[in-house]
Each structure stands twice: as structure tokens, then as C-alpha cells.
Amino acid sequence: MIEAIFTVTDKVIVGFEISGHSDYSEQGRDIICAAVSSAAYMTVNTITDVQFLEADITENDGLMKLSLSPEDAKAAEIILNGFLLHLNALSEQNKDYIKVKISEV
């Protein structure tokens, strides 16, 4: 199962961690993993290469983390909220394969 945890401070998303594999299908044919990965990379690339914001990013097999300062998180608020909405919609359609959580700190 894919688990996405969004970290929220003062009602602003300051980061996320996505881990795991959906196991919906074999590697290379798993449309759920592909959807989540594509959206995550678009989000990170928009924040870092379009908005030119500083982000702490970790990538490994089955893991992606992004962390922003509160100021940069506020500047990236629209893209992060869109990413959360997208993953929530995927989760609603694929409850056995994706879980989305909010961690308020």
C-alpha cells in the first residue's frame, strides 16, 4: 500500500512523505504507482524548478519526501493543496492501495 503523509503547520502544508508500493499490478504496469509518482514528481519539480523554492528532498525506491520552510510552503500552497486533493481523489477510488494522512505539527 502507498501511504502519503502531509505535514501541516498553521493550516499550511510544509511537506509530505510518500512511501510504499500499491501492489495493484506488477512493476512497470502498476497504474496506481505511476499516477502517484507522476503527480509527486510534477509537484516537486514545480516547486523547485518553476517557483525556484528551496526544498529538502529525499528520493529512494518507494520513498519520496519533501520539506519546506514555512515561508516557502506558503509560496507553494496552491500546488501542495492541489497535490493533496489529487491523492485524496486517487485514494477514494483505490482505498485498498493508497492511504492519505494529515499530520499537524
Image (cartoon, rainbow, N blue to C red):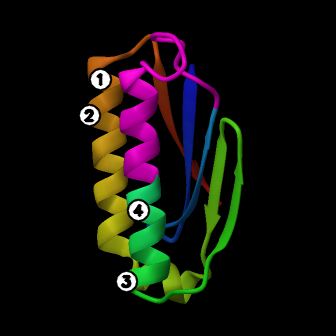
Where in the figure is residue 28, as x and y percent of width and height? 48, 23
The quarter holding residue 69 reads bottom right
Residue under label 3, please give it: 50
Ranked by sequence position, the earlier of labels 1 and 3 is: 3
Tell me what residue is drawn at x 46 percent, y 42 percent: 37
Q: Report the magenta residues as a range.
A: 20-40
**Image depth: mark 3 or mark 2 in front:** 3
Q: Is residue 60 left or right of residue 29?
A: right
Q: How many numbered marks have been drawn onto this rendered protein structure? A: 4
Residue under label 2, please give it: 89
Residue under label 1, please give it: 92
Ranked by sequence position, the earlier of labels 4 and 2 is: 4
Whether the residues at callouts 4 and 2 have beta carbons within 8 Å, the answer is no
Ranked by sequence position, the earlier of labels 1 and 4 is: 4
Work out how far the residue at label 1 is from the one at label 4, CA to CA, in angstroms. Answer: 20 Å
Work out how far the residue at label 4 is from the one at label 2, CA to CA, in angstroms. Answer: 16 Å
